[in-house]
Protein backbone atom coordinates (compact mmCIF):
# COMPACT_ATOMS: atom_id res chain seq x y z
CA UNK A 1 0.00 0.00 0.00
CA UNK A 2 2.81 2.41 0.88
CA UNK A 3 4.33 1.97 -2.58
CA UNK A 4 1.08 2.74 -4.37
CA UNK A 5 -1.18 5.20 -2.53
CA UNK A 6 -3.67 4.94 -5.40
CA UNK A 7 -4.42 1.27 -4.89
CA UNK A 8 -8.11 0.97 -4.06
CA UNK A 9 -10.60 -1.87 -3.81
CA UNK A 10 -11.18 -1.42 -7.54
CA UNK A 11 -7.61 -2.50 -8.23
CA UNK A 12 -8.09 -5.64 -6.16
CA UNK A 13 -11.42 -6.44 -7.83
CA UNK A 14 -10.13 -6.05 -11.38
CA UNK A 15 -6.50 -7.09 -10.86
CA UNK A 16 -5.19 -3.74 -12.12
CA UNK A 17 -2.46 -1.48 -10.78
CA UNK A 18 -4.22 1.88 -10.89
CA UNK A 19 -7.92 2.79 -10.44
CA UNK A 20 -8.26 4.13 -13.96
CA UNK A 21 -10.80 2.67 -16.41
CA UNK A 22 -10.92 3.62 -20.06
CA UNK A 23 -14.56 4.30 -20.87
CA UNK A 24 -15.74 1.99 -23.62
CA UNK A 25 -16.15 4.45 -26.48
CA UNK A 26 -18.07 3.11 -29.43
CA UNK A 27 -20.62 4.42 -31.88
CA UNK A 28 -22.47 3.94 -35.12
CA UNK A 29 -19.30 4.48 -37.12
CA UNK A 30 -17.38 1.88 -35.17
CA UNK A 31 -15.22 1.79 -32.05
CA UNK A 32 -13.11 4.67 -30.78
CA UNK A 33 -11.58 2.54 -28.06
CA UNK A 34 -10.40 -0.35 -30.20
CA UNK A 35 -7.93 -3.14 -29.41
CA UNK A 36 -4.78 -0.98 -29.66
CA UNK A 37 -6.05 1.69 -27.25
CA UNK A 38 -7.55 -0.87 -24.87
CA UNK A 39 -4.36 -2.92 -24.74
CA UNK A 40 -2.25 0.20 -24.21
CA UNK A 41 -4.33 1.29 -21.21
CA UNK A 42 -4.35 -2.19 -19.69
CA UNK A 43 -0.61 -2.60 -20.25
CA UNK A 44 -0.07 0.75 -18.51
CA UNK A 45 -1.80 -0.52 -15.38
CA UNK A 46 -5.39 0.62 -15.91
CA UNK A 47 -8.36 -1.23 -17.39
CA UNK A 48 -8.95 -0.80 -21.10
CA UNK A 49 -12.53 -1.27 -22.31
CA UNK A 50 -13.54 -1.93 -25.92
CA UNK A 51 -16.33 0.26 -27.29
CA UNK A 52 -18.65 -2.22 -29.00
CA UNK A 53 -22.01 -0.45 -29.10
CA UNK A 54 -23.83 -1.18 -32.38
CA UNK A 55 -21.21 -3.69 -33.58
CA UNK A 56 -22.28 -7.09 -34.86
CA UNK A 57 -21.50 -10.06 -32.59
CA UNK A 58 -18.95 -11.19 -35.17
CA UNK A 59 -17.09 -7.88 -34.97
CA UNK A 60 -17.25 -7.93 -31.17
CA UNK A 61 -15.64 -11.36 -31.23
CA UNK A 62 -12.95 -10.19 -33.64
CA UNK A 63 -12.08 -7.23 -31.42
CA UNK A 64 -11.88 -9.43 -28.33
CA UNK A 65 -9.49 -11.82 -30.08
CA UNK A 66 -7.34 -8.94 -31.33
CA UNK A 67 -7.13 -7.41 -27.86
CA UNK A 68 -6.10 -10.73 -26.33
CA UNK A 69 -3.24 -10.85 -28.82
CA UNK A 70 -2.01 -7.44 -27.65
CA UNK A 71 -2.20 -7.81 -23.87
CA UNK A 72 -2.27 -10.46 -21.18
CA UNK A 73 -3.78 -7.97 -18.73
CA UNK A 74 -7.49 -7.71 -17.84
CA UNK A 75 -9.71 -5.69 -20.16
CA UNK A 76 -13.40 -5.16 -20.73
CA UNK A 77 -16.08 -4.80 -23.38
CA UNK A 78 -18.71 -2.05 -23.35
CA UNK A 79 -22.14 -2.51 -24.95
CA UNK A 80 -25.60 -1.01 -24.59
CA UNK A 81 -28.91 -2.78 -24.03
CA UNK A 82 -31.65 -0.13 -24.39
CA UNK A 83 -34.98 -1.78 -23.62
CA UNK A 84 -37.01 0.61 -25.78
CA UNK A 85 -35.52 -0.48 -29.11
CA UNK A 86 -37.45 -3.06 -31.16
CA UNK A 87 -37.02 -6.74 -30.34
CA UNK A 88 -35.76 -7.59 -33.83
CA UNK A 89 -34.94 -5.82 -37.07
CA UNK A 90 -32.17 -4.95 -39.51
CA UNK A 91 -31.02 -1.59 -40.84
CA UNK A 92 -32.92 -2.16 -44.08
CA UNK A 93 -36.11 -3.08 -42.25
CA UNK A 94 -35.93 -0.05 -39.98
CA UNK A 95 -35.27 2.22 -42.96
CA UNK A 96 -38.46 0.99 -44.59
CA UNK A 97 -40.40 1.85 -41.44
CA UNK A 98 -38.96 5.34 -40.95
CA UNK A 99 -41.66 7.90 -40.17
CA UNK A 100 -41.36 11.45 -41.45
CA UNK A 101 -39.35 13.60 -39.06
CA UNK A 102 -41.96 16.29 -39.54
CA UNK A 103 -45.43 16.06 -40.99
CA UNK A 104 -45.10 19.12 -43.26
CA UNK A 105 -41.63 18.34 -44.66
CA UNK A 106 -41.31 14.62 -45.43
CA UNK A 107 -37.97 15.18 -47.19
CA UNK A 108 -36.45 17.14 -44.30
CA UNK A 109 -33.27 15.03 -44.23
CA UNK A 110 -32.61 15.65 -47.93
CA UNK A 111 -33.40 19.34 -47.50
CA UNK A 112 -31.01 19.58 -44.58
CA UNK A 113 -28.29 17.70 -46.48
CA UNK A 114 -28.45 20.23 -49.30
CA UNK A 115 -28.47 23.22 -46.95
CA UNK A 116 -25.39 21.92 -45.16
CA UNK A 117 -23.57 21.39 -48.45
CA UNK A 118 -23.10 17.68 -47.81
CA UNK A 119 -22.53 15.73 -51.04
CA UNK A 120 -24.68 12.74 -51.94
CA UNK A 121 -22.93 9.57 -50.67
CA UNK A 122 -21.18 7.78 -53.50
CA UNK A 123 -22.04 4.35 -52.14
CA UNK A 124 -18.45 3.72 -51.19
CA UNK A 125 -17.03 3.73 -47.68
CA UNK A 126 -19.12 6.14 -45.67
CA UNK A 127 -19.73 6.81 -42.01
CA UNK A 128 -22.20 3.94 -41.81
CA UNK A 129 -22.51 2.41 -45.26
CA UNK A 130 -19.66 -0.04 -44.71
CA UNK A 131 -21.29 -1.50 -41.64
CA UNK A 132 -24.96 -0.77 -42.29
CA UNK A 133 -25.88 -4.34 -43.15
CA UNK A 134 -24.64 -5.75 -39.84
CA UNK A 135 -25.08 -2.79 -37.52
CA UNK A 136 -27.07 -3.95 -34.52
CA UNK A 137 -30.09 -1.95 -33.44
CA UNK A 138 -32.43 -4.52 -31.86
CA UNK A 139 -32.74 -6.13 -28.44
CA UNK A 140 -32.08 -9.52 -29.96
CA UNK A 141 -28.79 -8.40 -31.49
CA UNK A 142 -27.68 -6.64 -28.31
CA UNK A 143 -28.25 -9.89 -26.42
CA UNK A 144 -26.10 -11.77 -28.94
CA UNK A 145 -23.26 -9.34 -28.20
CA UNK A 146 -23.43 -10.24 -24.52
CA UNK A 147 -23.39 -13.94 -25.33
CA UNK A 148 -20.09 -13.44 -27.20
CA UNK A 149 -18.59 -11.63 -24.20
CA UNK A 150 -19.62 -14.45 -21.89
CA UNK A 151 -18.38 -17.13 -24.28
CA UNK A 152 -14.93 -15.54 -24.40
CA UNK A 153 -14.82 -14.94 -20.65
CA UNK A 154 -13.82 -11.31 -21.04
CA UNK A 155 -12.83 -10.16 -17.52
CA UNK A 156 -15.24 -7.19 -17.48
CA UNK A 157 -18.53 -6.33 -19.16
CA UNK A 158 -19.54 -2.66 -18.98
CA UNK A 159 -23.12 -1.88 -19.91
CA UNK A 160 -25.14 1.29 -20.35
CA UNK A 161 -28.67 2.35 -21.31
CA UNK A 162 -30.28 -0.73 -19.85
CA UNK A 163 -30.59 -3.39 -17.18
CA UNK A 164 -27.99 -6.21 -17.23
CA UNK A 165 -29.96 -8.35 -14.74
CA UNK A 166 -30.70 -11.20 -17.20
CA UNK A 167 -26.97 -11.81 -17.66
CA UNK A 168 -25.27 -10.97 -14.37
CA UNK A 169 -25.45 -14.51 -13.00
CA UNK A 170 -24.09 -16.00 -16.21
CA UNK A 171 -21.27 -13.44 -16.12
CA UNK A 172 -20.44 -14.19 -12.50
CA UNK A 173 -20.45 -17.92 -13.21
CA UNK A 174 -17.69 -17.27 -15.76
CA UNK A 175 -15.75 -14.96 -13.44
CA UNK A 176 -16.80 -11.82 -15.35
CA UNK A 177 -17.24 -8.58 -13.41
CA UNK A 178 -20.15 -6.35 -14.48
CA UNK A 179 -19.95 -2.55 -14.52
CA UNK A 180 -23.24 -0.70 -14.85
CA UNK A 181 -23.06 2.85 -16.21
CA UNK A 182 -25.69 5.20 -14.81
CA UNK A 183 -26.75 8.84 -15.01
CA UNK A 184 -28.85 9.06 -11.85
CA UNK A 185 -29.22 7.80 -8.30
CA UNK A 186 -32.43 6.03 -9.31
CA UNK A 187 -30.58 4.17 -12.03
CA UNK A 188 -27.81 3.24 -9.61
CA UNK A 189 -30.27 1.77 -7.11
CA UNK A 190 -31.83 -0.29 -9.88
CA UNK A 191 -28.44 -1.71 -10.83
CA UNK A 192 -27.77 -2.77 -7.24
CA UNK A 193 -30.82 -5.00 -7.54
CA UNK A 194 -29.34 -6.36 -10.76
CA UNK A 195 -26.25 -7.41 -8.75
CA UNK A 196 -23.66 -5.50 -10.78
CA UNK A 197 -20.18 -5.50 -9.26
CA UNK A 198 -19.30 -1.85 -9.92
CA UNK A 199 -21.32 1.24 -10.77
CA UNK A 200 -19.96 4.00 -13.02
CA UNK A 201 -21.64 7.33 -12.34
CA UNK A 202 -21.30 9.34 -15.55
CA UNK A 203 -21.99 13.04 -15.06
CA UNK A 204 -23.11 15.82 -17.38
CA UNK A 205 -19.53 16.76 -18.28
CA UNK A 206 -18.94 13.40 -19.97
CA UNK A 207 -18.75 12.89 -23.71
CA UNK A 208 -21.24 10.61 -25.39
CA UNK A 209 -24.38 9.53 -23.55
CA UNK A 210 -24.37 11.29 -20.20
CA UNK A 211 -26.40 12.72 -17.34
CA UNK A 212 -28.21 15.97 -16.67
CA UNK A 213 -26.40 16.06 -13.32
CA UNK A 214 -22.82 17.21 -12.81
CA UNK A 215 -20.18 14.69 -11.74
CA UNK A 216 -19.34 16.55 -8.52
CA UNK A 217 -22.98 16.28 -7.44
CA UNK A 218 -23.86 12.89 -8.89
CA UNK A 219 -20.90 10.87 -7.59
CA UNK A 220 -21.29 11.29 -3.81
CA UNK A 221 -25.04 10.78 -4.01
CA UNK A 222 -24.59 7.55 -5.93
CA UNK A 223 -21.89 6.45 -3.46
CA UNK A 224 -24.25 7.05 -0.54
CA UNK A 225 -27.16 5.34 -2.27
CA UNK A 226 -25.44 2.09 -3.25
CA UNK A 227 -22.83 1.49 -0.55
CA UNK A 228 -21.10 -0.98 -0.19
CA UNK A 229 -21.18 -1.47 -3.99
CA UNK A 230 -18.09 0.37 -5.30
CA UNK A 231 -18.54 3.40 -7.54
CA UNK A 232 -16.27 4.92 -10.18
CA UNK A 233 -16.73 8.52 -11.29
CA UNK A 234 -16.94 9.65 -14.91
CA UNK A 235 -17.29 13.01 -16.60
CA UNK A 236 -14.86 15.92 -16.41
CA UNK A 237 -11.92 13.79 -15.26
CA UNK A 238 -8.75 13.95 -17.29
CA UNK A 239 -5.74 14.26 -14.99
CA UNK A 240 -4.42 13.54 -11.51
CA UNK A 241 -6.50 16.30 -9.98
CA UNK A 242 -9.68 14.70 -11.25
CA UNK A 243 -8.61 11.29 -10.00
CA UNK A 244 -7.92 12.59 -6.49
CA UNK A 245 -11.20 14.53 -6.51
CA UNK A 246 -13.11 11.37 -7.45
CA UNK A 247 -11.52 9.48 -4.58
CA UNK A 248 -12.39 12.33 -2.22
CA UNK A 249 -16.03 12.08 -3.32
CA UNK A 250 -16.09 8.45 -2.24
CA UNK A 251 -15.42 6.79 -5.60
CA UNK A 252 -12.87 3.97 -5.85
CA UNK A 253 -11.65 5.01 -9.27
CA UNK A 254 -12.41 6.87 -12.48
CA UNK A 255 -14.12 6.16 -15.81
CA UNK A 256 -12.32 8.27 -18.44
CA UNK A 257 -13.03 8.64 -22.13
CA UNK A 258 -12.25 12.10 -23.50
CA UNK A 259 -8.75 12.12 -21.99
CA UNK A 260 -7.88 9.28 -24.38
CA UNK A 261 -9.49 10.67 -27.57
CA UNK A 262 -6.38 12.52 -28.74
CA UNK A 263 -4.03 9.61 -28.21
CA UNK A 264 -2.10 7.94 -30.97
CA UNK A 265 -3.99 4.67 -30.40
CA UNK A 266 -7.55 6.06 -30.48
CA UNK A 267 -9.63 5.25 -33.57
CA UNK A 268 -10.65 8.87 -34.06
CA UNK A 269 -10.39 10.90 -37.24
CA UNK A 270 -7.23 13.01 -37.37
CA UNK A 271 -9.31 16.13 -37.96
CA UNK A 272 -11.30 15.39 -34.79
CA UNK A 273 -8.13 14.90 -32.78
CA UNK A 274 -6.96 18.27 -34.06
CA UNK A 275 -10.29 19.85 -33.15
CA UNK A 276 -9.97 18.57 -29.60
CA UNK A 277 -6.48 19.98 -29.25
CA UNK A 278 -7.82 23.36 -30.35
CA UNK A 279 -11.03 23.24 -28.29
CA UNK A 280 -11.98 25.06 -25.13
CA UNK A 281 -14.25 23.94 -22.30
CA UNK A 282 -17.15 25.60 -24.15
CA UNK A 283 -16.80 23.77 -27.47
CA UNK A 284 -19.14 20.86 -26.78
CA UNK A 285 -22.91 20.61 -26.92
CA UNK A 286 -25.55 18.17 -25.68
CA UNK A 287 -27.93 16.83 -28.32
CA UNK A 288 -30.22 13.93 -29.24
CA UNK A 289 -29.71 14.47 -32.98
CA UNK A 290 -27.17 11.69 -33.51
CA UNK A 291 -28.57 8.70 -31.60
CA UNK A 292 -31.98 9.79 -30.38
CA UNK A 293 -30.63 9.90 -26.82
CA UNK A 294 -28.95 12.72 -24.94
CA UNK A 295 -25.21 12.82 -25.60
CA UNK A 296 -22.37 15.34 -25.65
CA UNK A 297 -20.40 16.10 -28.82
CA UNK A 298 -18.00 18.65 -30.20
CA UNK A 299 -20.14 21.43 -31.63
CA UNK A 300 -20.95 20.90 -35.28
CA UNK A 301 -23.13 22.34 -38.02
CA UNK A 302 -25.49 19.37 -38.23
CA UNK A 303 -26.51 19.69 -34.59
CA UNK A 304 -26.79 23.48 -34.85
CA UNK A 305 -28.89 23.32 -38.03
CA UNK A 306 -31.22 20.70 -36.58
CA UNK A 307 -31.78 22.77 -33.45
CA UNK A 308 -32.26 25.98 -35.45
CA UNK A 309 -35.01 24.32 -37.50
CA UNK A 310 -36.68 23.15 -34.29
CA UNK A 311 -36.88 19.61 -35.64
CA UNK A 312 -37.99 16.80 -33.31
CA UNK A 313 -35.80 13.76 -32.83
CA UNK A 314 -36.92 10.19 -33.30
CA UNK A 315 -36.27 7.43 -30.77
CA UNK A 316 -33.32 5.05 -31.11
CA UNK A 317 -32.72 3.48 -33.60
CA UNK A 318 -34.87 5.55 -35.97
CA UNK A 319 -33.00 8.83 -35.43
CA UNK A 320 -29.51 7.58 -36.34
CA UNK A 321 -30.87 5.61 -39.29
CA UNK A 322 -32.75 8.69 -40.51
CA UNK A 323 -29.61 10.82 -40.73
CA UNK A 324 -27.36 8.18 -42.36
CA UNK A 325 -27.44 10.00 -45.74
CA UNK A 326 -26.03 13.15 -44.13
CA UNK A 327 -23.42 11.28 -42.09
CA UNK A 328 -22.30 9.13 -45.02
CA UNK A 329 -21.85 12.10 -47.34
CA UNK A 330 -20.05 14.14 -44.69
CA UNK A 331 -17.71 11.29 -43.82
CA UNK A 332 -16.77 10.68 -47.44
CA UNK A 333 -16.05 14.39 -47.90
CA UNK A 334 -14.05 14.66 -44.64
CA UNK A 335 -16.41 17.34 -43.35
CA UNK A 336 -15.06 17.71 -39.83
CA UNK A 337 -17.79 20.18 -38.90
CA UNK A 338 -20.56 17.71 -39.77
CA UNK A 339 -19.27 14.26 -38.75
CA UNK A 340 -20.21 13.85 -35.05
CA UNK A 341 -17.43 13.58 -32.48
CA UNK A 342 -18.46 12.53 -28.96
CA UNK A 343 -16.34 14.47 -26.46
CA UNK A 344 -16.59 15.81 -22.92
CA UNK A 345 -16.00 19.22 -21.41
CA UNK A 346 -12.38 18.49 -20.52
CA UNK A 347 -11.44 19.12 -24.15
CA UNK A 348 -10.00 22.45 -23.04
CA UNK A 349 -7.44 20.58 -20.93
CA UNK A 350 -6.08 18.53 -23.83
CA UNK A 351 -3.30 20.37 -25.64
CA UNK A 352 -1.10 17.72 -27.24
CA UNK A 353 -1.26 14.33 -28.88
CA UNK A 354 -0.04 11.68 -26.46
CA UNK A 355 0.17 7.93 -26.16
CA UNK A 356 -2.34 6.17 -23.93
CA UNK A 357 0.50 5.09 -21.69
CA UNK A 358 1.55 8.71 -21.24
CA UNK A 359 -2.01 9.72 -20.29
CA UNK A 360 -2.18 7.00 -17.63
CA UNK A 361 1.30 7.72 -16.27
CA UNK A 362 0.73 11.48 -16.06
CA UNK A 363 -2.61 10.98 -14.32
CA UNK A 364 -1.01 8.63 -11.79
CA UNK A 365 2.01 10.83 -11.12
CA UNK A 366 -0.15 13.93 -10.82
CA UNK A 367 -2.43 12.22 -8.31
CA UNK A 368 0.52 10.96 -6.28
CA UNK A 369 1.97 14.46 -6.07
CA UNK A 370 -1.32 15.87 -4.83
CA UNK A 371 -1.74 13.14 -2.22
CA UNK A 372 1.84 13.63 -1.02
CA UNK A 373 1.24 17.36 -0.68
CA UNK A 374 -1.97 16.83 1.26
CA UNK A 375 -0.23 14.54 3.74
CA UNK A 376 2.46 17.13 4.57
Image: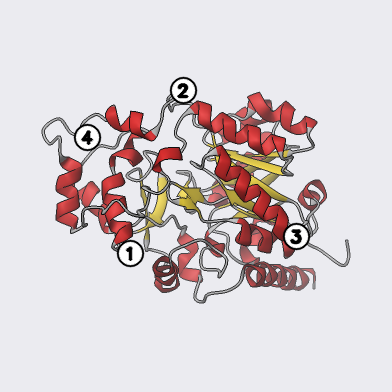
| Residue 20 position within the rendered picture, expressed as x and y whole percent measured from the top left | 68, 57
First in sequence: mark 3 vs mark 4: 3
Q: Which residue is mark 4?
A: 101
Number of marks present in the image shown: 4
Picture quarter with the C terminus:
bottom right
Residue nearest the observer in this picture, 3 or 145:
145
Residue nearest the observer in this picture, 129 or 107:
129
First in sequence: mark 1 vs mark 4: 4
Q: CA distance from mark 1 to mark 4?
A: 25 Å
Q: Which residue is mark 2?
A: 87
Of circles 2 and 3, the one toward us is 2
> What label does residue 336 carry, if any?
1
Q: Which residue is mark 3?
A: 18
Q: Are marks 1 and 4 in contact (CB under 8 Å)?
A: no
Q: Are marks 1 and 2 in contact (CB under 8 Å)?
A: no
> What label does residue 128 carry, if any?
none
Element type where label 3 sits in the image: loop
Q: Residue furthest right?
A: 2
Q: CA distance from mark 2 to mark 3?
A: 39 Å
Q: Residue furthest bottom?
A: 352
| Residue 48 position within the rendered picture, expressed as x and y whole percent measured from the top left | 66, 55
In this rendering, position of residue 88 left or right of residue 251: left
Residue nearest the observer in this picture, 296 or 153:
153
Task: State whether residue 142 is above or below residue 11.
Answer: above
Q: Are marks 2 and 3 in contact (CB under 8 Å)?
A: no
Disc 4 crowd rating (10 Å Cα; few below 14, some 14-19, many 20+) is some
Amino acid sequence: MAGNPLRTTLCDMLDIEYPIILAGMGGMGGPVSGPELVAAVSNAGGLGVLGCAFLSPQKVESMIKKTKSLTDRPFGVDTIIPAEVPLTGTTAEFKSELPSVTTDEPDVIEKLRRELGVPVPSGGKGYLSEMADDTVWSQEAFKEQVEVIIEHRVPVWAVGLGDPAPWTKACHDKGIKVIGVVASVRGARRLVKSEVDIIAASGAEAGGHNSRIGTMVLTPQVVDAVSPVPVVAGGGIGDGRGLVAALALGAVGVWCGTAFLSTSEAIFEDYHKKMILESTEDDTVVSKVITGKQARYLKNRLIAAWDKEGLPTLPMPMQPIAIIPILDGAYEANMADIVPAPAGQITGMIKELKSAKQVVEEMVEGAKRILAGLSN
